[in-house]
Amino acid sequence: MRIIFMGTPTFALPSLERLAQSAHQICAVVTGPDVPQGRGLKLQMPPVKQAALRFGYPVLQPASLKDPAFADELRALRADLFIVVAFRILPPALLDIPALGAINLHASLLPKYRGAAPINWAIINGEQETGVTIFRLKPTVDTGDILMQRSLPINEDDTAGSLAIRLSVLGADLLVETIDRLAVNDLPAQPQNDELATPAPKIFPELGEIDWYKDAFTIKCLIHGLSPSPGAFTFWQGKRLKILRASWQPHSATAEPGTIVARDKKSLSIQTGDGYLFPLELQIEGRRPLPVDVFLRGFSGKAGDRFAA
């Protein structure tokens, strides 16, 4: 089968790599623009472009997906199928170009967590299971008919970063299986039940401010759901302090939420509205992330001190 692959970030790499090893022919790879990064603001290629060039595939980086010239370029490639993994929303005019339409790999068990940040919200909401869905694209975002799904458990220590890695590998394997079955017309589609849909809207940094009056489990889920980026945060001596990983323990309140109840050379215990939170990785403003034992070497806080809002 002739396919065009569309994706930009690291999440899409396992899918591209698995497809490169398959029997299907990748006609071209469509990805986002090079972006300036670092102190020198040098242009950096997105991860998918780097991989595509390594494999020797033609790379397209349209400034606008609505450009008629870009649509003509795609038509000329005569692909049977478009595959979208962590890319922009395709305009309706592009969906009709390939004979078999366009399919998308989404990092949730649709119709749950439709939207831009399904991995983050699954962890923030304390879910115990998530997965990947491959579905047919249509103009309304994340609502197309489901082709295949596969689930996996969310571990207690999973962050959005670690879970994304596991889901990207799971999705890559399922994607190849899906295309193999589409090639022989052996894959019926199943409509989504819109009544079961839940949202996964874009994450904004302000969501990460920790409310210490919430319970420890809820705070831990927020921390892991926003790690490594944008990060859940509190304030210490006027500086923003991110907590990137944590554990928790149920315990009745013995101090005002946000108060340090105990610390030693290797651990820090913080009172929440219900239970204790134990930070495992922290990052003070302007510094790099540190494991808690290293962080505590330069931390002046003591039992009875309180993190500010």
Image (cartoon, rainbow, N blue to C red):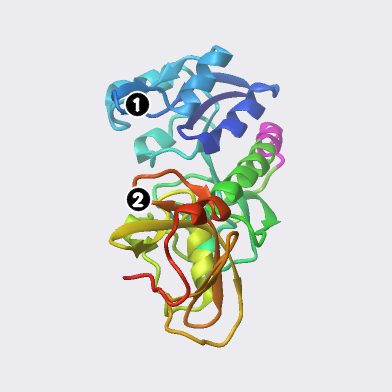
**Quarter of the figure that contains the C terminus:** bottom left
Residue at the (44%, 76%) spot, across then down: 259
Q: In this image, 89 relative to 41: left or right?
A: right
Q: Which mark lies nearer to you, 1 or 2?
A: 2
Q: Position of residue 127 (x, y in %)?
A: 59, 66
Q: Which residues are the magenta region?
A: 176-186
Q: Is residue 249 left or right of residue 300?
A: right
Is residue 178 on the magenta stretch? Answer: yes
Q: Position of residue 298 (x, y in %)?
A: 45, 53
Q: Residue 48 got which mark?
A: none
Q: Vertical placement of 58 versus 297: above or below?
A: above
The main secondary structure of the magenta stretch is helix
Q: Nearer the viewer, residue 222 or 84?
A: 222
Q: Which residue is mark 1?
A: 33
Please give left or right for residue 14 compared with residue 224 in the image.
right
Q: Is residue 94 shown above or below 213? A: above
Question: Residue drawn 34% across and 63% down?
Answer: 235
Secondary structure under the numbered disc 1 in the rendered image:
loop
Q: Is residue 126 visible?
A: yes
Crowd rating for badge 2 (residues with CA inside 10 Å; few <14, some 14–19, many 20+) = some
Nearest the viewer among 243 and 298 is: 298
Does the residue at mark 1 contact the one at mark 2 (Cβ under 8 Å)? Answer: no
Q: What's under tag 2, amino acid-wise? A: Glu
Instruction: Calculate the distance from the C-alpha at mark 1 to the C-alpha at mark 2.
Output: 30 Å
User: Residue 279 placed where, x, y %?
Assistant: 53, 62
Q: Which residue position holds label 2? A: 285
